[in-house]
Image (tube, rainbow, N blue to C red):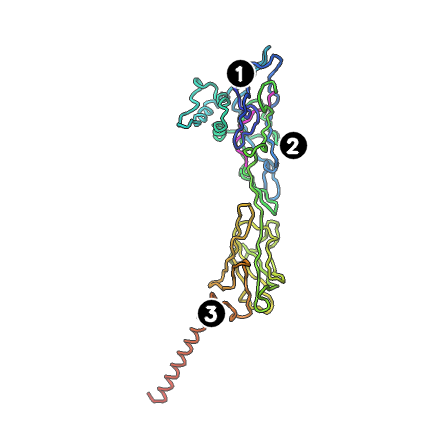
């Protein structure tokens, strides 16, 4: 007996999300057992996932509704039942047959030759695609199917929170292309501590339910988007994070200086104060050990600006820090500190980075600045002033001598 098979994902649901898991024996070309009756049992397609939030649209922490889906029928079920059993075939919809044939023309072998040439040579185009039982061919077609869908009314979309399913009523039995037509397709849910980016769904080639007597594997009309790694909803989670550094002073405060307040801004002019992902103003004050702790704040990747808005008592206000903070995402999806830079021009020399991490120093007078950076420039300026002053004294003395000598 010659079998004409149909991909489970075509007849019903299989995966058809990232790739299509093709199973054998999906459709029989010849009648099955004498007592069997093949029948279409519904007009719905059900999408099942482990995270229903992937099916929703988002505005920050609030869901604004469901994704928008479109559907295009690409083939009818042709069912014949007789005294010896039933048979099921695909018949490509006439209105879009030419466009579908053109799309199938892009499927080629390794030598670059078309695999589907014409209906005369290969038969019905969708039946041919089913019979290839080739994941790659079917995925390539689904990515560019030659048809566009009609938006499914929200009244025809049902959510089951318990079963974690979204069911689409397409009104007629058959094989469909289901499109995720949400705009924008990428949706981001913000929990405050994290952001979850849902990339949206690839096109799905899937059929409405069929009775078990049709001899179609997975003929339930359910696309299980959590059954395999290829079918899982594509998403990425970013965990917001913070950072810390140490504040020190002079003499007894060399190991830690308490009472230094730092405020974070989004601009280098320090005009717009930052709030973190939970709406908390980003301000931290060094404790007894001198630690300025921003680890409790939920920051996104990006550039921030810190200003020391309160200098500890007895310390010189001129040593207040102005720092540029760069946060980035690591391979684990965690937002972490990338670097801290001194914004002083010239640099003050008060920011160091060593075995104990970043350390910022306060001093009590300009004379305690490091002999590099701003202190070095200050000394050079002082020397220049002294030299100029010395030259003035020499000139004045020379003039006095000349007067005394009557020259």
Q: Is residue 189 magenta?
A: no
Do labels 2 and 3 touch, CB within 8 Å? no
Q: Which mark is residue 378?
A: 3
Do labels 2 and 1 touch, CB within 8 Å? no
Q: As drawn, which residue projects farthest toward the right?
A: 162
Q: Which residue is mark 2?
A: 163
Q: Main secondary structure of the magenta part?
A: loop
Q: Is residue 203 magenta?
A: yes
What separation in Å lies between label 2 and label 1 (alpha carbons)? Answer: 35 Å
Q: Residues within 10 Å of mark 1 (few under 14, many from 20)?
A: some
Residue 356 at what x, y percent from top left?
55, 59
In the image, residue 4 above or below residue 191: above
Q: Residues within 10 Å of mark 3 (few under 14, many from 20)?
A: some
Q: Which mark is residue 29?
A: 1
Q: Residue at x 43, y 24 (%)?
A: 115
In the image, residue 375 above or below residue 11: below
Specify whether 109 is left or right of 292: left
The first of marks 1 and 3 along the sequence is 1
Q: Residue at x 43, y 17 (%)?
A: 120
Residue 324 at what x, y percent from top left?
51, 57
What separation in Å lies between label 1 and label 3 (alpha carbons)? Answer: 93 Å
The answer to whether residue 150 is visible is: no
Element on which disc 1 rests: loop
The first of marks 2 and 1 along the sequence is 1
Name the mark nearer the viewer: 1 or 3. Answer: 1
Split into 4 quadrants, where in the image is the C terminus?
A: bottom left
Q: As drawn, which residue projects farthest toward the top?
A: 83
Residue 288 at what x, y percent from top left?
63, 62
In the image, which residues are magenta? 200-211
Q: Which quadrant holds residue 174?
A: top right
């Amino acid at each position: 007996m010659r079998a004409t098979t149909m991909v489970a994902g075509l007849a019903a649901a299989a995966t058809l999300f990232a790739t299509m898991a093709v199973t054998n024996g999906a459709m029989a070309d010849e009648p099955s057992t004498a007592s069997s009756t093949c029948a279409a049992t519904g007009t719905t397609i059900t999408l099942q996932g482990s995270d229903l939030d992937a099916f929703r649209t988002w505005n920050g922490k609030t869901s604004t509704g469901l994704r928008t889906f479109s559907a295009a029928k690409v083939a009818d079920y042709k069912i014949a039942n007789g005294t010896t059993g039933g048979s099921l075939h695909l018949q490509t919809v006439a209105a879009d047959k030419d466009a579908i044939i053109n799309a199938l023309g892009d499927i080629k072998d390794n030598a670059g030759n078309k695999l589907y040439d014409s209906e005369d040579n290969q038969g019905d185009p969708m039946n041919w695609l089913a019979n290839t039982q080739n994941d790659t061919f079917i995925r390539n077609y689904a990515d560019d199917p030659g048809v566009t869908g009609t938006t499914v009314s929200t009244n025809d979309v049902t959510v089951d929170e318990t079963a974690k399913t979204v069911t689409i009523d397409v009104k007629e039995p058959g094989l469909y292309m289901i499109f995720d037509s949400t705009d924008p397709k990428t949706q981001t849910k913000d929990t405050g501590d994290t952001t979850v980016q849902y990339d949206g769904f690839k096109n799905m080639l899937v059929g409405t339910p069929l009775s078990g007597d049709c001899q179609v594997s997975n003929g339930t009309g359910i696309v299980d988007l959590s059954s395999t790694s290829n079918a899982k909803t594509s998403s990425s989670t970013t965990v917001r994070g913070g950072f810390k550094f140490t504040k020190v002073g002079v003499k007894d405060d060399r190991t830690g200086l308490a009472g230094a307040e730092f405020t974070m801004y989004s601009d280098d002019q320090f005009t717009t104060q930052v709030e973190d992902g939970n709406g908390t103003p980003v301000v931290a004050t060094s404790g007894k050990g001198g630690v300025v702790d921003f680890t409790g704040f939920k920051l996104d990747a990006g550039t921030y600006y810190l200003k020391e808005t309160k200098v500890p008592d007895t310390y010189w206000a001129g040593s207040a820090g102005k720092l540029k903070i760069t946060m980035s995402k690591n391979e684990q999806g965690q937002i972490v500190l990338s670097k801290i830079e001194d914004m002083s021009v010239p640099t003050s020399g008060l920011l160091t980075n060593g075995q104990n991490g970043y350390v910022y120093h306060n001093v009590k007078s300009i004379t305690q600045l490091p002999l590099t950076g701003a202190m070095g420039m200050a000394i050079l300026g002082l020397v220049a002033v002294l030299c100029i002053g010395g030259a003035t004294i020499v000139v004045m003395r020379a003039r006095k001598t000349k007067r005394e000598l009557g020259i």
